[in-house]
Image (cartoon, rainbow, N blue to C red):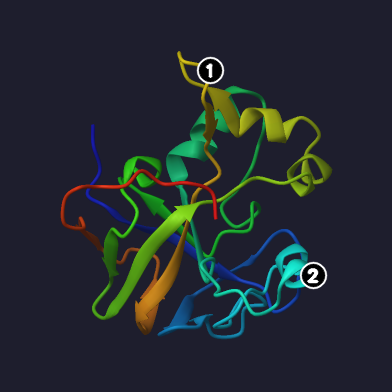
Amino acid sequence: MPYTPHVIAVHLNPAHTFSKHPVDSIQMVAGLGVEGDAHRGATVQHRSRVARDPSQPNLRQIHLMHRELFDELLHQGYDVRPGQLGENITTQGVELLALPCGTELRIGADAVVRITGLRNPCAQIDSFRPGLMGAVLARSTTSQLIRKAGAMAVVVTGGRVVAGDPIHITLPDLPHTALEPV
């Protein structure tokens, strides 16, 4: 049974650690990300990217993860909870990985994010749970790598987001561009 797209949980962490903490609400700020989160900023905040070029635009202000991935991981023997993989927003009923680049999600009454690409899972996933990296990666029938660790976005319009908020999806104009890692 398909779900109406909505938010399951919200998370933030002021420190640069792997997981994010569950909170009652997050405040998204246009052009920056989540208030109080270590990855908030107009330029890159992920340490590896800052080391390469700190002036790059931050295309990873918001990390969205689909709850359906947690069910899939549980079937593979990994008990992973929302926020533990570092996402700010856990969704349900949104096929995040199938959305084209530039898709806008209105979350709750005011907030709008624009999808910029896929999360490229890193070795920290295996440090969190050994073998988990292999579980969030797959191969298509044509041997293309499939990244399942969520989507990244920038904040277009700020606003407060809480669990239960509806998500409205607006696709960009055609032609659509498939998501790539950012």
Q: Position of residue 36 (x, y in %)?
A: 61, 85
Q: Amino acid at mark 2?
A: Ala
Residue that badge 2 annotates: 51
In the picture, residue 46 is in which quadrant?
bottom right
Q: Disc 1 marks which amino acid?
A: Ser
**Residue 67 rendering spot, x and y as whole percentages:** 45, 45
User: Does residue 146 sit above or below 105 in this rendering?
Assistant: above
Determine the residue positioned at 75% across, 75% down. 15
Which residue is tagged 1?
A: 143
Q: Position of residue 57 (x, y in %)?
A: 55, 75
Q: Residues within 10 Å of mark 1 (few under 14, many from 20)?
A: few
Element carrying mark 1: loop
Q: Is residue 141 above or below residue 67?
A: above
- Relative to 35, say whether 23 is above or below: above
- The residue at 36%/84% (across/down) is 158
Position of residue 40 in the picture relative to residue 4 (left or right): right
Residue visible at 67% across and 32% down? Answer: 78
Q: Is residue 112 left or right of residue 147?
A: left
User: Residue extending furthest top?
Assistant: 141
Q: How many marks?
A: 2
